[in-house]
Amino acid sequence: MAATLSKLKLSLLLSLLLTSVSSLAKVPLTCKRIECPSYEVIHQGNGFEIRRYNSTAWASTSPIQDISLVQATRTGFRRLFDYIQGKNNYKQKIEMTAPVITEVSPIDGPFCESSFVVSFFVPKKNQANPPTAKDLHVQRWKPLYAAVRQFGGFVRDSTVGEEAAALKASIAGTKWSSAIEESHRAGHASVYTVAQYNDPLEYDNRVNEIWFLFDLENGRQSS
């Protein structure tokens, strides 16, 4: 009997451990090769985590109107790639970072268009004085929070909305959901943000994320 109870306890412990490990978001392999923004995980949930991002600067496109997130991200990335290749006011090459993020906000228009802002995380050595460029601006984030859901493969217009809906469902009824809704009402956040960590030509170990950004402190500024 004692041996049976010991086995049951061990089985339960292993089950809890495996459940805990499986719920953790993995750090993308890309972030071991190139620079990514630092953050602190302040809460682990079922299918999501809450992060606190430090103060950061991002080079961002002007809003791109399109019916396709994938196409808008490609358009924005081409502008940002030119930017880091030296087409900026300093004529300075900038190191590639990850992720490239696309903020999504619906707009009133034909064919269910949305407005997309595509952004590049400015490396630490350029954060204090990032160059500007035509059709780009610098977003300076003060400490900011994000509810995050990871998913693999390539980002597709047909499924990204489902991933955002899954994140919304997983945080429903929590204090995080209330904070996100309040930020949206105050106009401090887009509906959701898609973060992509991999080069378009990488097919294995792809990591993408849905972010619901929200403000518990001071939010963001643009310059």
Image (spheres, rainbow, N blue to C red):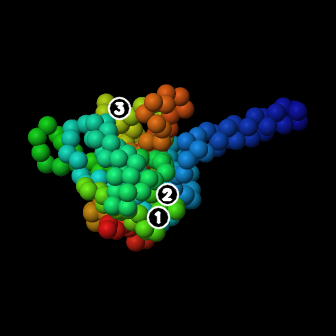
- Most foreground residue, 62 or 147: 62
Q: Residue at x 42, y 57 (%)?
A: 92
Q: Are marks 1 and 3 in contact (CB under 8 Å)?
A: no
Q: Give the mark, 1 or 3, whose residue is nearer the N terminus.
A: 1
For residue 11, side relative to residue 169 (left or right): right
The picture quadrant where one finds residue 159 is top left
For residue 83, side relative to residue 48 (left or right): left
Q: Residues within 10 Å of mark 1 (few under 14, many from 20)?
A: some
Name the spot of residue 184 as percent of width and height, x first: 30, 59
Name the spot of residue 118 as percent of width and height, x first: 33, 49
Q: Give the mark, 2 or 3, whose residue is nearer the N terminus.
A: 2
Q: Residue at x 34, y 56 (%)?
A: 88
Q: Which residue is mark 1?
A: 127
Could you tell me how far apart the alpha carbons at marks 2 and 3 are, in whole angstroms?
A: 28 Å
Name the spot of residue 153 as percent of width and height, x first: 46, 30
- Of tags 2 and 3, the one toward the viewer is 2
Could you tell me how far apart the alpha carbons at marks 1 and 3 are, in whole angstroms?
A: 31 Å
Give the amino acid type for the residue marked by disc 3 in the picture. Arg
Q: Secondary structure at mark 2?
A: loop
For residue 201, side relative to residue 112 (left or right): right
Give the amino acid type for the residue marked by disc 2 in the picture. Pro
Give the amino acid type for the residue marked by disc 1 in the picture. Gln
Q: Are marks 2 and 1 in contact (CB under 8 Å)?
A: yes
Q: Which mark is residue 43?
A: none
Residue at the left extreme of this rendering: 110
Q: Which residue is mark 2?
A: 123
Q: Secondary structure at mark 1?
A: loop
Q: Which mark is residue 156?
A: 3
Q: Secondary structure at mark 3?
A: loop
Q: Is residue 144 visible?
A: no
